[in-house]
Image (cartoon, grey):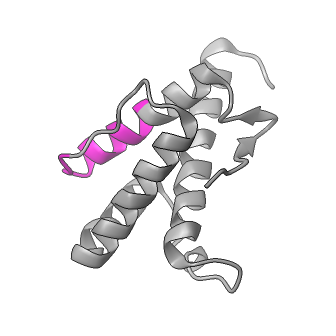
């Protein structure tokens, strides 16, 4: 599965951006009390497959854990269900979009420039 996720012209295909998104995701997992970590040096498609697998597993085993994590990440739960895709695929997009937004905004405000 290949996703074109971007925010303010910044895309996951940029290697340093992907690494920062994975770091942010790992931080949010830790802050949510979850003992799961994605490899920082993952290739984009491998990372997306791993994240989708984690979402599917967590959704089937304990959806409360997943919803607590979504709250931490600040994903709107009303956007999860869509006619266009399966819930886990929507979650994947929503999580990646939100984590990318955090990375871009953090970088933008720390450098004082806009993209």
Q: In this rendering, is residue 15 above or below 36?
A: above
What residue sits 52% from the left and 66% below the top? 91
The secondary structure that most of the magenta stretch takes on is helix
**Residue drawn at 41 percent across, 41 percent down:** 25
Q: Nearer the viewer, residue 36 or 52?
A: 52
Q: How many marks?
A: 0
Q: Position of residue 14 (x, y in %)?
A: 67, 25
Q: Is residue 71 visible?
A: no
Apparent side of residue 108 relative to residue 48 in the rendered image (left or right): right
- Visible in this render: residue 30? yes
What segment carries the magenta color? 23-35
Q: Position of residue 80 (x, y in %)?
A: 55, 75
> Residue 51 colored magenta?
no
Is residue 80 positioned above or below 101 on the image? below
Q: Position of residue 85 (x, y in %)?
A: 64, 77
Q: Residue at x 48, y 57 (%)?
A: 74
Residue at the far top: name it: 111
Depth check: give the residue in front, 73 or 97.
97
The residue at the point 51 percent across, 35 percent down is: 21
Please tell me in which quadrant of the rendered image residue 54 appears: bottom left
The answer to which quarter of the image holds residue 59 is bottom left
- The furthest residue to the bottom: 83
Instruction: Check the picture and name the quadrant holding the N terminus.
Output: bottom right
Q: Is residue 29 magenta?
A: yes
On screen, residue 42 above or below 75: above
Q: Quadrant of the C terminus?
A: top right
- Residue 30 % position (x, y): 25, 42
């Amino acid at each position: 599965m290949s996703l074109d996720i971007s925010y303010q012209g910044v895309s996951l295909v940029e290697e340093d951006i992907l690494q920062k998104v994975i770091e942010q995701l790992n931080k949010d997992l830790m802050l949510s009390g979850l003992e799961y970590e994605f490899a920082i040096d993952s290739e984009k498609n491998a990372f997306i497959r791993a994240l989708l697998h984690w979402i599917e597993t967590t959704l089937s085993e304990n959806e409360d854990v997943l919803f607590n994590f979504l709250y931490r990440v600040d994903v709107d739960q009303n956007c999860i269900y869509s006619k266009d895709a399966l819930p886990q695929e929507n979650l994947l997009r929503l999580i990646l979009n939100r984590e990318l937004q955090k990375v871009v905004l953090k970088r933008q405000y720390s450098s004082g420039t806009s993209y």
